[in-house]
Amino acid sequence: MDNILTINALTKNYGRIRALDGFDLEVNKGVVFGLLGPNGSGKTTTLSILLDIVKPDRGSFRWFEEPPSHHSRKRIGATLEYPVFYPYLSAVRNMKIIARIKEKPFGDFEEILKLVGLYDRKDDKFRTYSMGMKQRLAIASALIGNPEVLILDEPTNGLDPQGIADIRNLVIRIANEGKTIILASHLLDEVQKMCSHVAVLKRGKRLFAGPVGEVLVVADTIELAAADMKMLTETLIGFRGVRDIRREGEYLTARLDKGVLPEDVNKYLASQGVVLSHLAMRKRSLEEQFLELLKEGE
Amino acid sequence: MIRLLKIEWEKVRSYRAFWVMTGLYLFMLFSVIFGLPAFLDYLASHAGNDETLKAVKSIVFNFPDIWQNIAYVAGMRGFIKIILAIIVVIFISNEFTLLTIRTNILNGMSRTEFLIAKLEFVFLLALLSTFIVFLSGLYLGLNNSPVTNLSAILGKIQFLPAYFLEVFTYLIFALLIGTLVKKTGFSVILLLLYIIIEPIIQNYLPDSFHKYLPLNAMNGVIWSGNTSYLQIKTPEINISLQQYISWGDAGICFSYAVLFTVILYFYLKRKDL
């Protein structure tokens, strides 16, 4: 059984707003899957539907290749939107409620609380926690009972830089144990650092999905032209900072290595006696869309 | 279903407001039930002699009438029972305002289980209230009733399950208001306002329909006290006191309990949380 989650044409309207529009997805076992998109793109709506908080208007989904039920949810550890707990109860009391719901023992609380760095405050009321501590408790509660799947909705929201680093390391560590993780984020950087696969959402639609390496390639491509194209090609091959040199119509294209600027290429070519008649950066269309996406998300 | 009760127990065990309110309710209940003899003493002291005092007390606290009398007083509409309903309204609407219902559901509680947990909770509250009424009745009866044989004691004991039914149904009503309104403050206000609203609605309805209104139904199973010593029926004064519990009245009340539960069930089943 390799398939953990299958989503089929999920659609959800809130009044006249279409939050989710025929969303499809497949998540396999052991994958760290990023749901990437700006605020309001449908990430939380998707997760809410998967957790039976919200009812879809159309479409269906399956957990563990079974029709969804509360039993399948007991095998999932999840955080949703912002941390929600009983404010008048301590971390431990809140976790007890969740463990009882999931029918899991209380034995792993100490380890989990230490893992997320909340052990010292475990007996204080939730109400007295800072945003960062609330977020840590949310992640702690998701880890109760060693679930097969972890759903994390914006897990680094509200955390300070140290907290962000802690949580990211924690997620990567858990992922390395082979757990399936579904992570929603509006931060490209976060998804790139933590996820193996990604689906990009925009206005409730899936723009693309696939392995992070394929979907989120951010290497820049340049276009070049010179009077003597043959000489340009031969000279460019001698430059170490570029890859994938190709002829495309009247231009030559090449992928820049990380940290290499078009100026460096130009300087090198000039030093070799090649004078360019054309030099331009070409954003990959995906990246263009993505940046636009993120801009809208701000 | 013990698991669901344990979950609810975790939610209230260190919730101070819950215990303060419950303490207040129990205090009021005791005050009213045990204040009753003091009140009768006061009335009798104005009559002037000791014999009357004893007589008045034994009229009201005579087994088996005592069950009906204290169940009637403890269950009067808009009276102490309202505190219990307010506790329930706060308890359920908190789940919606704090969004903790989401935490419950996403961690693997089904929506039906959520409802069952709440029903179990209010069932226990109603049971607790009935038990207090039972203990108080037993104590007061044994101290004041001229007759204390077993058949007299158990004579009108069916007024206790009737009291339970009224309280339980009223608490499900509170669950319904808290669930539909969601905002804690508004829910409490609506619960209180409805006590005034229903008599207004009643004015516009034919007499025969009155007993089918929810609040009337939830207070109509035990609709008066009674005493076998006192039957006033003259052409001038016509006070009719309840003699027995009618299955019809109990049925109407129970139907409301079922109706509220069904509404809650379908509402929770379909609603985005």
Image: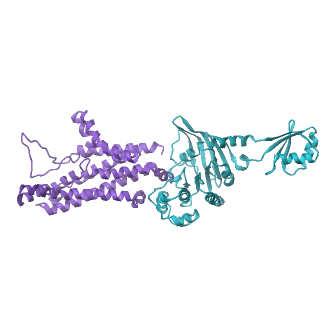
Chain colours: A cyan, B purple
Measuring from the top left, give residue B105's x and y in whole percent. Answer: 48, 51
Figure quadrant of residue B269? top left
Q: Is residue A219 above or below residue B199?
A: below
Viewer-proximal residue, B6 or A191?
A191
Q: Where in the figure is residue A33, as x and y percent of width and height?
A: 64, 51
Placement of A182 over or under A119, stated as above or below: above
* Residue A291 falls in image quadrant: top right
From this viewpoint, is residue B181 visible? yes
**Above or below for A142 versus A253:** below
Question: Percent from the top left, x then y, of residue A193?
Answer: 68, 54
Q: Nearer the viewer, residue A273 or B161?
A: A273
Q: Identify which residue, A217 or B196, lies in the foreground.
A: B196
* Residue at 26% from the left image edge and 56% from the top image edge: B28
Q: Quadrant of the C terminus of chain A?
A: top right
Looking at the image, which is closer to me, A263 or A100?
A263
On screen, residue A51 versus residue B182, left or right, reads: right
**Would residue B23 be found to the left or right of residue B92 on screen?**
left
Q: Position of residue B206 (x, y in %)?
A: 23, 33
